[in-house]
Image (cartoon, rainbow, N blue to C red):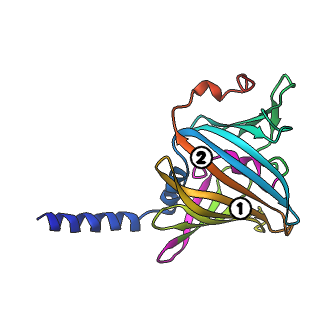
Amino acid sequence: MKRIFLIISIIFISKTIFCLSAQDIVKYVDANLTFVEGEMSATIIDFKNNKENKRMSVDIKFKRGRGTLMEFTSPAREKNKKILMINDNMWMFVPGISRPIRMSAKDSFMGTSFSNRDLMDFDIHNDYSAIILEQQENEYKLELISSNKNVTYPKIIMWVDKKSLLPKKQELYTISDNLIKTIDFSETKYFNGKLRPSVMVIKDILTQGNMTKVLINTMTEKQIKEELFSPQNIER
C-alpha cells in the first residue's frame, strides 16, 4: 500500500512540474533567487576592454513588496553611499548631501554594464508576460515581454534549469528587438539553505570587452524593519 501511494505521489508531482506555465516558472525563478526578506553582501567587479576597471562591495537589505536598500562598503570613495528602490522609484543618498538624489532605474549602475534595476529589482514576474519557446529534457527556454514601460529591457529570452528552476542565461533586447546584453548565471551554492547561483556575469554585445561580474558572498533570511525603506530615512 505504501509503495502504491509513493508511485501515485511521484506521478502527481511529475505532472504538476510538467504542467507549469511560463508565468509559474518565472515566479519560481524569482522565489528561488532570494528570500521573502533578508540581507546579502556582494562584490561587483567591472571590466572595460577586458581589464578590471573598478571593484565595489555592497550590503543589500530587501523585503518583497516593500523595497530594496543597498549600501556601499568599499572602495573608500563610495563608502556609505546608499541606493533605495521602491517599486519603480529610486533614490541615492550621498554623505554630505542633505537630500536623496532621484535616479532612473534604466541608467547604468555606477558606470557598469548592469542597469540600476538589474541589481535592485528581485521580482521580474510582476513586470513581464512569459511564454515557453522551447522545452528540452533539462531546461526551459522562455520569452518574456514587458508589461511595464519602466523596465530596462522590453524583451528577455531566459533559459531555466528544469530541476532547480534557477536561471542559466538571459538575453536582453531593446524595443527594436536588438540583442544588447547577455547574463550568465553560474557556481550554484547554498546560502542559508537556499540554492542559487553565486555568480552573475553581464556582457555588453555592442562594446566587446565590457562586462560586469557580481559575486554573491552571503545571503541570509531575516526580518527587516519596514521603516528602512523610506527616502526620508535613507540617511540614517
Identified at 50% across, 60% down, the residue is: 25
- Drawn side of residue 196 relative to residue 214, left or right: left
Occupied quadrant, residue 87: top right
Q: Is 113 colored magenta in this rendering? A: yes
- Drawn side of residue 117 relative to residue 189, left or right: right
Which of the image's four quarters has the N terminus?
Answer: bottom left
235 in relation to 211, above or below: above
Mark 1: secondary structure: strand
Pointer 2 and pointer 1: residues touching (CB < 8 Å)?
no
Which of the image's four quarters has the C terminus?
Answer: top right
For badge 1, the amino acid type reads Val
- Drawn side of residue 188 relative to residue 7, left or right: right
Identified at 49% across, 62% down, the residue is: 165
Occupied quadrant, residue 183: bottom right
- Name the front one of labels 2 and 1: 2
Q: Position of residue 134 (x, y in %)?
A: 54, 75
Q: Which residues are magenta?
A: 112-139
Q: Is 25 colored magenta in this rendering? A: no
Occupied quadrant, residue 153: bottom right
Asked if residue 57 shows in the view, the reply is yes
Which residue is the site of mark 1?
201
Which residue is the site of mark 2?
218
Q: Earlier in the sequence, mark 2 or mark 1?
A: 1
For badge 2, the amino acid type reads Thr
- Drawn side of residue 58 relative to residue 196, left or right: right
Identified at 54% across, 38% down, the residue is: 37
